[in-house]
Image (cartoon, grey):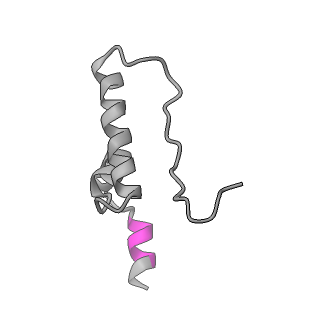
Amino acid sequence: MDKPGKAMTPNLQIATAAPTSAAGASAGSFDRRIRAFLNGESHGEDVLDALYGHVADEPVPEQLRALLRG
């Protein structure tokens, strides 16, 4: 149980071995960006772009466009 008045810090430990490649080394950077967002130090655009940026490049299906036009 948390003590009153104590700020809760999220545990974002990565469940992998120590980074051995460029991809692994960037995991620490990504962890820092998530922590910065959760602490209110950024707006999280870089985190969302890293997670879902590839989706933004996909075209909107015609059926969805028609539905949104109403």
- At 30% from the left and 63% from the top, the residue drawn is 43
What percent of the width, then of the height, locates residue 28?
Answer: 35, 32
1 sits to left or right of 9:
right
33 over 5 or under it: above or below: above
* Residue occupying image coordinates x 41% and y 76%: 66
Q: In this view, does 45 lie to the left or right of 38?
A: left
Give the residue at x 31% y 55%.
56
Q: Nearer the viewer, residue 44 or 48?
A: 44
Region in magenta: 62-67
State the residue lying farthest toward the top: 20
- Residue at 50% x, 35% y is 13
Residue 68 lies within the magenta run: no
Q: Residue furthest right?
A: 1
- Horizontal arrangement in the rendering, residue 65 relative to residue 22 (left or right): right
Query: Is 64 drawn above or below residue 48 in the view shown?
Result: below
- Residue 50: percent from the left, percent from the top? 32, 45
